[in-house]
Amino acid sequence: GNSVTQMEGPVTLSEEAFLTINCTYTATGYPSLFWYVQYPGEGLQLLLKATKADDKGSNKGFEATYRKETTSFHLEKGSVQVSDSAVYFCALRKAAGNKLTFGGGTRVLVKP
Amino acid sequence: GAGVSQSPRYKVAKRGQDVALRCDPISGHVSLFWYQQALGQGPEFLTYFQNEAQLDKSGLPSDRFFAERPEGSVSTLKIQRTQQEDSAVYLCASSLTQGDSYEQYFGPGTRLTVT
């Protein structure tokens, strides 16, 4: 079946540090890949997505590249801010499917 | 505009009670999803509607769980004879229709605690 594995948190960083959250997936076919973010007290929001191999999704300074050869979709940001403190979820959606399959989430805490 | 809303936001139920959780999707959204998120874990798919048709209920954990969307808008997730393992946040999401171009918008969730 389909599954998503992401690094466990919490990840604690200082402001302006470089952030990487690893995500790998198992799926048949060619899924679409997503990063969702959940800020404290808020609902899940789509951060970025990529729908085919070698696509790069980007938003709010975050980037992730769909790597089919390594079945990975790692999230990166060059200089984090306190406001980036949140829980980040990697997810996939099977081609022609609808439901999302999520990883377990990674809590990120950015300290001033 | 208004996003996805869910009610109640918090629900405490005694074991064995029945509960009903409501989801109001974004107006005009055809697709509606329910997910269950246990503490410290990622959301897990429960069921999917397109308009009033329930097209996928493969994630419902037992026959105590039942979902409906009779008029293709508001949806209700019902859990009968609640058990402690049902304690979780129940998330609803809607999208304009199906496919890669259409983002799923999530509601704030209903936190269910079964005592």
Image: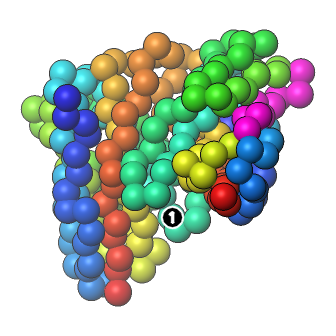
Residue drawn 26% across and 79% down?
B13
Image quarter hosting the N terminus of chain B:
top left
Which one is in front, B61 or A27?
Answer: A27
Q: Is residue A25 above or below residue B79?
A: above
Q: Is residue A56 above or below residue A112?
A: above
Which one is in front, A35 or B113?
Answer: A35
Tell me the amino acid under the disc marked 1.
Ala
Q: Main secondary structure of the magenta part?
A: loop
Image quarter hosting the C terminus of chain B:
bottom left
Is A45 part of what is drawn in magenta?
no
Question: Could you tell me residue B30's position as x and y percent?
Answer: 25, 23
Magenta-highlighted residues: A69-79
The residue to which callout 1 is attached is B38
Chain for numbered disc 1:
B
Question: Could you tell me residue A96's position as x and y percent?
Answer: 53, 17
Query: Regarding mark 1 in the picture, which secondary structure is present there?
Result: loop
The image quarter containing residue B9 is bottom left
Q: Which color scheme is applied?
A: rainbow
Question: Could you tell me residue A89's position as x and y percent?
Answer: 61, 45
Q: Is residue A110 visible?
A: yes
Residue drawn 34% across and 26% down?
B95
Residue drawn 25% across and 72% down?
B11
Which one is in front, B80 or B1?
Answer: B1
Farthest residue toward the front? A112
Looking at the image, residue B18 sits to the left or right of residue B42; the answer is left
Farthest residue toward the left? B71
The image quarter containing residue B103 is top left
Q: Is residue B25 above or below residue B22?
A: above
Question: Could you tell me residue A87's position as x and y percent?
Answer: 58, 53
Which one is in front, B69 or A105?
Answer: A105
